[in-house]
Image (cartoon, coloured by chain):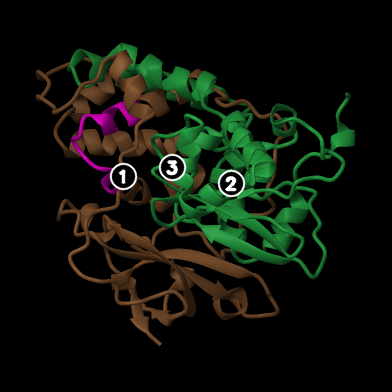
Chain colours: A brown, B green
Amino acid sequence: MNGPHDMGGMQCYGPVVPEPDEPIFYHDWERKALALTVAMGATGCWNIDISRHARESLEPAQYLSSSYYQIWTAALEELLVGYELVNIGELETGKVEAKGQSVNNVPDGEHMATALRQRHPYERPAKSAPLFEVGDTVTTLNLNPRGHTRLPRYARGKTGTVERVAGCHVFPDSNAHDKGEDARWLYTIGFEASDLFGGKADHIVHVDCWEPYLERG
Amino acid sequence: MAKDNDHHPDHSHLDEMDIRLRTLESLLVEKGYVNPDALDAIVETYEKKIGPQNGAAVVARAWSDQAYLERLRNDATSAIAELGFSGRQGEHMRIVENTDEVHNLVVCTLCSCYPWPVLGLPPVWYKSAPYRSRAVSEPRAVLSEFGVDLPEATKIRVWDSTAELRYLVVPKRPKGAEDWSEERLASLVTRDSMIGTGLAAQPNDQTP
């Protein structure tokens, strides 16, 4: 989806403002936003690609005027209502109106602490050999799907070089829409910045691209 | 996007978030979807236990032990796990090494992907629109906003974290710390040097 989240190459946001020794959380509610988002992720009601898509599907003005934990909170509320785990009345009043649905997994403190330190890999067994190898010249497709994609706008229809074959990974464009993991080969592609942004830029930009984003040449 | 640390003259906005999150928490606990102890465990993990000190230990080992560096190059996820660091948002780790010729910079233009097991949670600027928009198109200008000015000849390589691969920059080892222990070397490895928006600290910046 060509949404406000896809920021690479935009010029309108001003300078970066680093803040030395910034706190991990500025407000206590940010702790809750993190914890509730991670904990609801652990229930297995949705996957990480669905939650990313919920965040990028917020109203553009809301997305751009929100802090990141505000974005997480708003997206979590959307998901809870969308999956009928909570209704809008409950969100407004805080009073439970309907008994909770049963969910797959509600870890206690100990299990959660352990789970956070465990890997949940996204690599899957491949059903076929990769189409491309290191050194191949490839061009990204000019894809503009209405749904979720991880091919940024600045890197569409651009030619680069395969620098790494990174394994066969869960494909977000499918997984974000509950259409299955549909694992595809993933490649790290190096692009000349001048090919992406014009001008005299002489750096290299690497983008991790799934095979369906790419064609040879 | 607005910054998390905006100081609004009107605090009602913050109060509103506070109320909204309290409401959400009590609903989700009461409905049985989340366990309050698990919420505490999440906050404690990322506020107290996991942070840039983990990545600094990895870098200091890489500087000190050539065989470890080779293992990082071949399979960073396993090599990092040797030091006890693994988990969410670090499933598929990769290191990128700074040299005299190359400087690496990591970003996530589409959201806020960041290697949690080695760096903890990302700083506000990493998630902000200015960084996400310009790190890919004008990295030298972004670096100068962090006070980093690289020689013209240094090639910059930017890594946009569009998949579940997570990048850790191994900064250049500073001169003047040749005989330092691994533990002492780790004190030179700043968080920003492992994102690429900074360099490792110089030994003479530190009191002995």
Residue under label 3? B78
Amino acid bearing label 1:
Pro
Residue under label 1? A121
Residue under label 2? B67
Marks 3, 1 in one chain: no
Q: In the drawing, does residue B82 fall left or right of residue A145?
A: right
For the record, the magenta segment spans: A36-51
Amino acid bearing label 3:
Ser
Nearest to viewer (mark 3 / mark 1): 3
Amino acid bearing label 2:
Ala
The residues bearing labels 3 and 1 have C-alpha atoms spaced at a distance of: 12 Å
Q: Residue B147 lies in magenta, yes or no?
A: no
**Is residue A68 depicted above or below B168 in this figure?**
above
Marks 2 and 3 close (CB-CB < 8 Å): no
Q: Secondary structure at mark 2?
A: helix
Residue B190: image location, x then y, percent: 70, 37
Q: Secondary structure at mark 1?
A: loop
B143 and B7: which one is in front?
B143
**At x 39% / y 36%, what residue is drawn?**
B88
